[in-house]
Image (cartoon, rainbow, N blue to C red):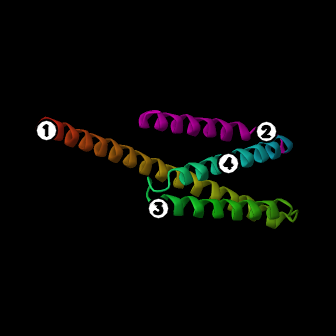
Amino acid sequence: MALSDQLHRLADRADQAERQAAAAMDKAMADLEQDLKQSREDAQQDAEQLRQAAEAARGKISDSWNDIQKSWNEHSAQLQKSLETKIAEVDLARAQRHADNAEADALYAIDFAYSAIAEAEYAVINAQLARKTADELAAGTSARA
């Protein structure tokens, strides 16, 4: 799959997330709880696929991507545990604090994803430049031979 196709896939996923978030405003709590469960399962599956891809590409991708992926998995697990604990709280003040914190986490996650998209764009352009450089060097080498 071409790098630009992967960016298009990313944009499609962002659109899907936006539609899901907009629809959530009109859903009942039971439906939101089910959506939350499904979203967590999907995120865990995506994280596992990413982990496997990083492992398969070890030596081809920068070590820092492996470090980021590991850190993200740890963050996701910690956040999930925290959310499960907070959902069980029934005290009004705690529930309101939890809602405020959950909204702040969501906003930061969006900002983080936005930054990741910019980083992906940079990586794609860098990869295309590296490929063109290698192709030109190969063409120059074969012309000299």
Give the Cα distance between marks 2 and 4: 21 Å
Q: Secondary structure at mark 1?
A: loop
Give the Cα distance between marks 4 and 3: 23 Å
Q: Amino acid at mark 2?
A: Lys
Give the Cα distance between marks 4 and 1: 51 Å
Left or right relative to 28: residue 53: left
Provide the residue designation for mark 3: 63
Left or right relative to 50: residue 79: right
Q: Nearer the viewer, mark 1 or mark 3?
A: 1
Say which label, 4 or 1, has the lower sequence index: 4
Provide the residue designation for mark 1: 145
Q: Give the x, y percent position of residue 50.
A: 59, 49
Q: Give the x, y percent position of residue 27.
A: 79, 39
Say which label, 2 or 1, has the lower sequence index: 2
Q: Amino acid at mark 3?
A: Asp
Magenta segment: 1-29
Q: Nearer the viewer, residue 105 or 94?
A: 105
